Amino acid sequence: MPSRILEERIRTRAYELYEQRGMRGGHALDDWLQAELELSGPKALPQEPSVESPSLSEAEFKRRIYEKYKGHFDHFYRLHQLAEWALVEYGALTKDEYHATVQLILPRALKSFDSIRRLCEIASSEDAAVILRSLLNLLAVTRWISVDSKRRAKKYLAWYWVQMHHDAEFFADVVPSEFIADIEKHYDRVKPQFEYRDGNGKIRMPKQWYQPEVHSIFDMFKEVGLEKQYEEGYKPLSGIEHSDCMSYFAMLREAERSDGKTQLAVQSDMFVPHYLRNAFQYFADIFRICNQTMALADPEHFEKIVTAGIAFYKADMKAKGLNP
């Protein structure tokens, strides 16, 4: 059976097991392993590494990371299961530009949310950080559009043709002429939405779809009440994405030193709980906004999952002497 099909069947069966237990959390990994056992046999279960093995198998490493941060993963899994199942069951038609926008945003957010979890399971924290930054950026965009949903969603979607026009000009030698003609037609149609006059009265086209209403991503964050998240999350995570020296902090901070040698902590899990917590909060906010339009999930059930998750993460931070 193709791996993708098998994985989807395992995921569906795991959710069924979750429902059979009354949707009580704390057993996400057990449900997954039980579903693997039922659908693909004993070989699907993680194997213990042999005594002679110099390193852990990936499955065993993931299991140890999960056990170390069980609560963090369980709340994460619970929200992911709800969102994924809701999208699978969703079949409503697009009503307007804003509806179309949130239909695009939520699956994109879910993929980022899931990717962060997968990378945290193997302690690839630097890569998780890059996607976490992208998810935070998407949260700011989602909030900002929702403030003036009809007009901003229309611009958000229309920018597709502005970008296509730019790319077609840049790659003119490889883009078929019939495609260029179609792109030009749509570009001419949407261009008036973005044109504005500068201080000298000249007509300009902005470099980004949200300009000149806001001039930068920081302005957007500030306008939707995410200035703190920008300073404490977006800026530090940008350093990791752009490979600044601080992107190696965890590997250096947890490096092992013996016999005059230093062994970098390449698979450091220092930031795993922080990235899971932040991803949970960012995705929950996006899901809440989209759910108000798409009616994907029962709001009461959704808020119950989110409230429990936030309470756990706050308690965990306080226990570590951190300010939630």
Image (spheres, helix red, strand yellow):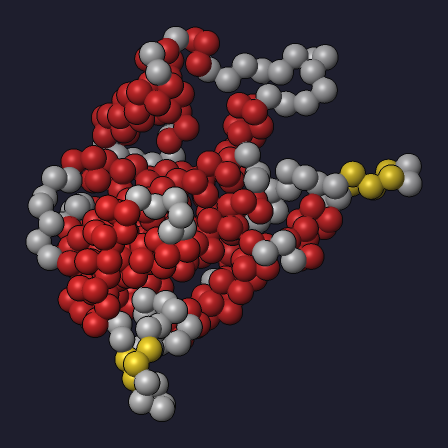
Question: Viewer-proximal residue, 305 or 225?
Answer: 225
Residue 148: percent from left, percent from top: 20, 71
Residue 58: percent from left, percent from top: 56, 25
Image vertical order of residue 239 relative to residue 175, above or below: below
Q: Looking at the image, which residue is at 33% across and 73% down?
A: 205
Q: Is residue 279 left or right of residue 58?
A: left
Numbered label tally: 0
Image vertical order of residue 151 relative to residue 271, above or below: below
Image vertical order of residue 291 relative to residue 195, above or below: above
Residue 316: percent from left, percent from top: 49, 52
Question: Viewer-proximal residue, 193 or 15?
Answer: 193
Q: Is residue 30 left or right of residue 289?
A: right
Q: Looking at the image, which residue is at 35% across and 53% down?
A: 168
Image vertical order of residue 286 relative to residue 323, above or below: above
Q: Is residue 207 left or right of residue 84?
A: right
Question: Viewer-proximal residue, 88 or 20?
Answer: 88
Residue 214 in view in this figure: yes
